[in-house]
Amino acid sequence: MGISLALFVVFCTVALLGYAVIPMLYNTSIAYGKRKEQRLADRMDRLLPRHDARKMARRFVLAPIVVPVVCYVLFPVDFKLFGVVLGILAGFIAPGIYAQALTQNNRNKFNDQLIDALMIMSSSFRGGLSLIQAFEAVVEEMPDPMNHEIGTVLGENKMGVSLEDALNHLYNRMPSPAMQQMITAILLARETGGNLPLIFSRIVNNIRERKKIQQNLDTLTLQGKIQGGVMSLLPFGFAFIVYSSNPHFFDSLLYSEIGRKLLIAAVCLELLGAFFIWKISTFKDF
């Protein structure tokens, strides 16, 4: 009787805790998911149409749940836990890396198109057009992302946002020294006057010189990147060759608890070392 009463009390306690905690956890997870979806959608909205950005953000939010389940199904029985952990890490990290890569790719395209945009604006000024008309010429003649970004500036200006604020918003989306120089030249010319075509020509020359220096840096650091790639792939290649010649060579490593922990630690350290090699061999844009 006493044991039954104790079990009943424990059951009621667990039920009450579940009734109180589970809704709170559910609401917290829903709120966190919405905040994460909104942040990802704001980042992706600069790269994709709004509807597609929302769909992509929802997929990113579901990734930490879907990827571990897929890894659990695909991995062998002895590696189920490792697959789940790997899936959770990939689900949380991969969306941010993907969004960052898309953002950086978009910025690189924009910076590559900036020279042509400045030349179009210089020609427009020499033809007697105003600044807004020069922007409209850039929108008409340039492809995305330059077309989209300058069109956003014009759209904000038509909605009542000052040109200075619209250009600052553009710089926040596409930060670069050349962009800062262009915006500063435009704002100073509007207030004090100045020869914008000449200033833009100097900015174009600066951009070209910066590209030459960056290409030299990429050439000098290429050897380090190749060495890092080879050293990162070497353990996997060695393991593949040994396993192909003797499949039972790694049995003590794969089928023992300590061996699996050491294997996970080795993979993590290998990835960490590859990351540091890549960071050492990479220069940020100056």
Image (tube, rainbow, N blue to C red):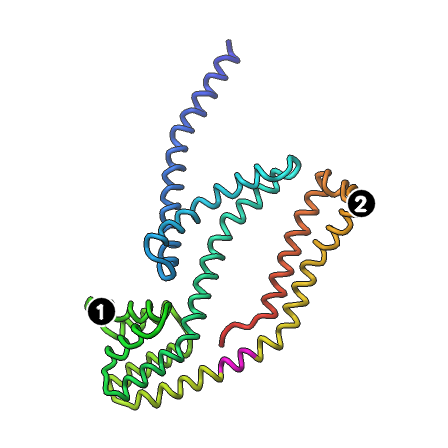
Nearer the observer, 208 or 140: 140
Report the magenta residues as a range. 210-215
Q: Secondary structure at mark 2?
A: loop
Mark carried by residue 170: none
Could you tell me residue 102's position as x and y percent? 45, 61
Q: How many marks?
A: 2
Q: Amino acid at mark 2?
A: Asn
> Circle 2 is placed at which residue position?
246
Residue contact between numbered discs 1 and 2, judged by CB atoms under 8 Å:
no
Q: Is residue 207 above or below residue 33?
A: below
Q: Is residue 70 above or below residue 48?
A: above
Could you tell me residue 137's position as x and y percent? 28, 77
* Residue extending farthest front: 141
The magenta stretch spans residue 3? no
Q: Quadrant of residue 163?
A: bottom left
Closer to viewer: mark 1 or mark 2? 2
Left or right for 191, reference 80: left
Left or right for 280, reference 234: left
> Circle 1 is placed at which residue position?
161
Nearer the observer, 137 or 260: 137
Left or right for 124, reference 103: left
